[in-house]
């Protein structure tokens, strides 16, 4: 199977590195509008440099599209029209209309269109998912330092959309209400944002994203009826606590009635969560290649990308309204 990489920025270089190491995959080559970037990536990955997208289309069966978000629709459409299977880095596009066009084109051409929501393949998240059962409240914090990468879009499409996708995958229900607040600090668009999502099943999620933090953080906390999970996506760790099976809550309540401080450890116990380590991007690319070979729906398909984008765009709309009121 011949795979190419279109766009050799930070993510494109990583895609090329992993494809080059995969058995039964031929890294056909790379292309970027910056020839120096293409050449450097090709040297590292041991592959050729395509001189144009057209030459790439003629030499590959599938492609990773790692170009800036505003170019996703145009580049993705060209790849699909050429008959290539596409792994589109997140978000699927910067508008819902363009995202739907990509979805429809992929269906028309009978090609796999996978969206690069990489946190789905984070081993900590995959381990935690096995213990999630109807969360009632979720809290997400995704903080990053400011950098050029991703600054072509607001922080909602740059960072927050990762957690939006995870929430939609885990909670599996319609979003009934969204409240949002944010501020532009260093760029021309929102750099810090907070959104509160209320789902049809009653779950409430509070999401915070910032790209002007001095520390890096990617944490998501799930509160359930009888358990709590804290997932550190950056360090790939999971801490889980649950109410001890069979614990008689009356003992707890009686101690409180006597004015005593109940022993929390009698009621709550830690739970060891097994994590199978694998580089998330490697798992994502293996999943894409398998979907193409087996002609099956990808783990994160176009519909997933569209759902996450719809919520993200609604958050951005609310942020724009907030700015309008503030002015």
Image (cartoon, grey):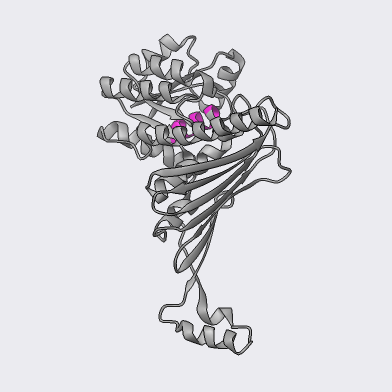
Residue drawn at x 47%, y 48% as measured from the top left: 198
Q: Residue lying furthest bottom in this view? A: 258
In this view, the residue in front, 122 or 146, is 146
Q: As displayed, is residue 202 above or below residue 293?
A: below
Q: Image quarter for residue 128?
A: bottom left
> Looking at the image, can residue 192 be seen?
no
The location of residue 231, given as percent across then percent down, is 53, 55
Side (left or right) of 17 relative to 200: right
Name the quadrant of the N terminus: top left
Q: Which residues are magenta?
A: 12-21
- Number of labels in the image equals 0
Magenta stretch: dominant secondary structure: helix
In this view, the residue in front, 93 or 322, is 322
The location of residue 92, given as percent across then percent down, is 45, 28
Side (left or right) of 238 relative to 304: right
Whether 19 is among the magenta residues is: yes
> Looking at the image, can residue 319 be seen?
yes
Residue drawn at x 51%, y 42% as measured from the top left: 178
Whether 260 is among the magenta residues is: no
Q: Image quarter for residue 68?
A: top right
Name the quadrant of the C terminus: top right
The location of residue 174, given as percent across then percent down, is 39, 44
In this view, the residue in front, 236 or 160, is 160
Residue drawn at x 26%, y 35% as measured from the top left: 294
The location of residue 55, given as percent across then percent down, is 42, 10
Q: As displayed, is residue 225 above or below residue 320?
A: below
């Amino acid at each position: 199977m011949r795979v190419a990489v279109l766009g050799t920025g930070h993510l494109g270089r990583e895609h090329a590195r992993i494809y080059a190491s995969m058995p039964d995959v031929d890294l056909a080559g790379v292309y970027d509008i910056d020839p120096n970037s293409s050449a450097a990536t090709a040297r590292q990955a041991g592959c050729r440099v395509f001189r144009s997208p057209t030459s790439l289309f003629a030499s590959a069966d599938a492609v990773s599209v790692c170009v800036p978000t505003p170019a996703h629709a145009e580049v993705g459409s060209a790849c699909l029209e050429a008959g290539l299977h596409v792994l589109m880095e997140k978000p699927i596009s910067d508008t819902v209309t363009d995202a739907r066009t990509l979805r429809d084109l992929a269906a028309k051409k009978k090609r796999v269109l996978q969206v690069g929501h990489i946190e789905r393949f984070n081993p900590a998240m995959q381990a935690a998912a096995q213990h999630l059962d109807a969360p009632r409240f979720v809290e997400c914090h995704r903080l990053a330092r400011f950098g050029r990468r991703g600054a072509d879009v607001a922080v909602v499409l740059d960072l927050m959309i990762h957690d939006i996708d995870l929430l939609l995958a885990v909670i599996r229900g319609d979003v009934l209400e969204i409240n949002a607040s944010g501020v532009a600090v260093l760029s021309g668009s929102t750099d810090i944002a907070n959104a509160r999502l209320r789902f049809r099943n009653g779950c409430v999620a509070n999401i915070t994203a910032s790209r002007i933090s001095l520390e890096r953080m990617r944490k998501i906390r799930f509160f359930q009826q009888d358990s709590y999970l804290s997932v550190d996506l950056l360090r790939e760790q999971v801490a889980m606590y649950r109410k001890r099976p069979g614990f008689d809550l009356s003992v707890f309540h009686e101690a409180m009635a006597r004015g005593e401080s109940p022993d929390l450890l009698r009621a709550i116990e830690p739970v060891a969560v097994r994590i199978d380590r694998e580089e998330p991007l490697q798992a994502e690319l293996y999943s894409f290649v398998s979907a193409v070979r087996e002609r099956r729906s990808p783990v994160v398909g176009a519909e997933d990308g569209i759902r996450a984008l719809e919520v993200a765009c609604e958050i951005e709309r609310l942020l724009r309204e907030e700015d309008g009121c503030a002015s």
